[in-house]
Image: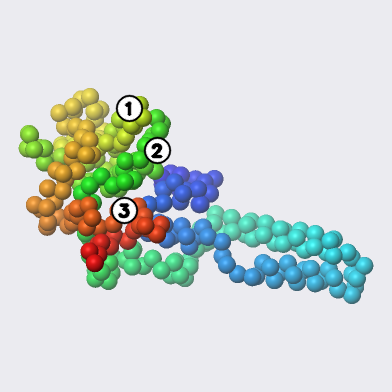
């Protein structure tokens, strides 16, 4: 994702549509950086040019031609602005500290010793929804879906559990999944590793250090592991105790709030 970000040919809105759709901080950054600035400046400039075209000195100019000239002038101004923006981007001066201050992202980016108490708790505590959520059961095409895979990794990546049969402590790989192809039921399952697993070594040469686990099987083991090890900072919720992680009933992003029994 960062290689694509460094590529100057990748439009920001496309990058964010692929990679930041389900992340808290990058979502807010995308809205602020990629959104069109609201204002009447461009409209005022167009009307100023139009009024100039309709002045007494150019009284014989028809309204249609005056409008066309005002439109051409506005497009020319926009193109000049794009060229100036590209020049400042190449020089590395497109953004300064004041611009970043207006993004209001400090609470999410400050060091823990400088952040507010609520933010410290939120950033050091992981919420785990101990059931298969509705979005996890959506169908996936035979070619897979990188956005769906990223959501699976976001929920399960890095979590630990104990194999109830052999007693081994597995970790869910943070960057890899196991794509299971089955007609009409393709799915991303978990690629689980032991502590001595080496990403550089070929999987076939360390078959005793990794296993593929289905989510519906491992999810109970993950919940049990963190219920026993609450000091690890992972809070486990059961179905009905907290909203699902995609959207609530009104279509807004879920903030992780606990469901009110009242």
Pair 3/2: label in front: 3
Tell me the number on the disc at residue 182: 1
The residue nearer to you, when weighing 201 against 153, is 153
Residue 61 percent coordinates (x, y): 89, 65
Q: Which secondary structure, mark 3?
A: loop
Image quadrant where residue 90 sits: bottom right
The residue at which mark 2 appears reads as: 145
Mark 1 touches mark 3? (CB < 8 Å) = no
- How many labels sit on residues? 3
The residue at which mark 3 appears reads as: 245
x 38%, y 36%: residue? 140
Q: Earlier in the sequence, mark 1 or mark 3?
A: 1
Q: Earlier in the sequence, mark 1 or mark 2?
A: 2
x 22%, y 35%: residue? 214
Mark 1 touches mark 2? (CB < 8 Å) = no
Q: Earlier in the sequence, mark 3 or mark 2?
A: 2
Mark 3 and mark 2: span between their CA atoms?
18 Å
Image quadrant where residue 120 sits: bottom left
The residue nearer to you, when weighing 240 against 22, is 240
**Relative to 102, is 236 on the left or the right?**
left
**In the displayed structure, would residue 55 be above or below residue 167?**
below
């Amino acid at each position: 994702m960062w290689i694509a970000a460094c590529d100057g040919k990748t439009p920001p809105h496309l990058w964010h549509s692929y990679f930041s759709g389900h992340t808290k901080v990058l979502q807010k950054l995308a809205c602020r950086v990629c959104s069109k600035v609201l204002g009447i400046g461009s409209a005022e400039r167009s009307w100023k040019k139009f009024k100039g075209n309709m002045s007494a000195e150019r009284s014989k100019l028809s309204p249609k031609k005056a409008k066309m000239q005002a439109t051409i002038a506005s497009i020319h101004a926009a193109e000049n602005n794009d060229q100036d923006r590209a020049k400042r981007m190449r020089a590395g001066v497109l953004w300064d500290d004041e611009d970043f201050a207006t993004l209001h992202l400090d609470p999410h980016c400050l060091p823990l010793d400088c952040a507010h108490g609520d933010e410290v708790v939120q950033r050091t505590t992981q919420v785990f929804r101990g059931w298969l959520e509705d979005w996890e059961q959506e169908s996936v095409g035979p070619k897979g879906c990188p956005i769906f895979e990223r959501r699976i990794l976001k929920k399960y990546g890095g979590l630990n559990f104990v194999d109830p049969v052999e007693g081994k402590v597995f970790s869910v790989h943070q960057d890899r999944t196991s794509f299971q192809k089955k007609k009409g039921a393709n799915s991303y399952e978990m690629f689980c590793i032991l502590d001595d697993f080496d990403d550089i070594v070929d999987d076939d040469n360390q078959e005793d250090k990794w296993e593929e686990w289905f989510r519906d099987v491992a999810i109970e083991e993950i919940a049990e592991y963190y219920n026993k090890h609450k000091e690890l900072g992972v809070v486990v919720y059961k179905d009905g105790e907290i909203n699902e992680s995609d959207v609530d009933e009104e279509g807004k992003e879920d903030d992780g709030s606990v469901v009110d029994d009242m």
